[in-house]
Amino acid sequence: MHICSVNITRRPRSHTGSRGHSRYLHETQLLLRVGHLPYYMSDSNTANFTNPSTFILLGIPGLEAAHIWISIPFCIMYILAILGNIAILFIVKRDPSLHEPMYYFLCMLAINDLVLSTTIQPKMLSIFWLNSREINFRAFLTQMYFIHTLSSIESGIFVAMALDHYVAICHPLRHSTILTNSVVAKISLAVVLRGSVLVFPHPFLARQWPYCRTNIILHSYCEHIAIVKLACADIQVSSYYSLSVAFFITGLDVFFIAVSYTQILRAIFILPTKDARFKTFGTCSSHLCAVLACYIPSLFSFLTHRFGQNVALHFHILVANIYIQLPPTLNPIIYGVRTKQIRDTLLRLFSRQGSLSFLVVL
């Protein structure tokens, strides 16, 4: 194992600018460990390298000794995400009665969650288990692009599902004529293209900056702002574009979901009986739970980063890991438990398997 020394050059005052960057420089005045050897991040004016080809993901700084224990719940989440989303795809494929727009969007969500989990978790677990912290710069940019793109697509899928619920409740007689297979395919394509195109400049902007301070990244996965903060240049273009895309996607999606549910609630409240209102609203419960599981941890992470200046760095990283990995784990559980058609199909499959096993034993 080799020992590396890392020097951080202080930015000129004109480039420091933001309170977040000052906080970042303050946090890096600590002893960080890679493997079992320390990296001392000093405030020297010399630099040993320029534009390194590899970077080092520290995992969760300050909690290196607990990485093995921290990895256990994340590993369980990954297994549940893989099994749960594959189960959703299998159930929808097997049952022709589920070949409807809602379940097509659900399958799209399951595929998105499978790819998102697999993009993040294997590398993160290798950091926790094997101290495999180095990552090629191109690999970093690739993972970063997929993480942000898939997160954007997930948000767009929730909007598409909200639209499906709106049409099903407010225009039930026209549902099959409005949301045809062709329309569903166009909506799905638009959701994918929106996320892919809007995030596309991120890796190119990150790649153009010169890096001469350090190759140590205080994170457990490839996050956009975590890398551009290390640049020896004014990163306002990257920062403003990243913030604009986040607000545009999240703000627009939350707005459309809110408008959809406003119309849905209006339609529900005019139903004649309480049972009818409760049953109709129950059809939206799975979607609402999934939306809350996606947006609430994300909002909490944003608020702690923006206003929690005294919150420990490892807490920020833990929250960031949870909010991006929780939805792929919870979505199949939420839809499996709260959606009657999926639950009934799953029970039929298990009962059929049990009957076949019993006959084989006999």
Image (spheres, grey):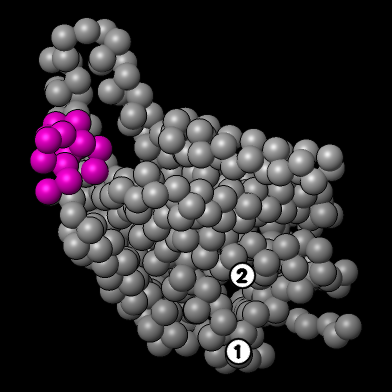
Image position, residue 358 (x, y; %): 78, 38
Q: Residue at x 60, y 90 (%)?
A: 53
Q: Is residue 314 visible?
A: no
Residue 52 has which mark? Answer: 1
Is 234 placed left or right of 54 in the picture?
A: left
Query: Looking at the picture, does residue 148 appear above or below residue 91?
Result: below
- Residue ranking furthest to the top: 273
Location of mark 2 (residue): 217
* Residue 214 visible in the shown view: yes
Secondary structure state at the residue bearing disc 2: strand
Q: Of 312 and 337, which appears nearest the observer?
A: 337
Q: Magenta span covers which residues?
A: 164-177
* Residue 171 covered by magenta stretch: yes
Q: Position of residue 307 (x, y in %)?
A: 44, 42
Residue 3, image x, y percentages: 84, 82
| Secondary element at image label 1 | loop
Amino acid type at circle 1 is Pro
Q: Residues within 10 Å of mark 1 (few under 14, many from 20)?
A: some
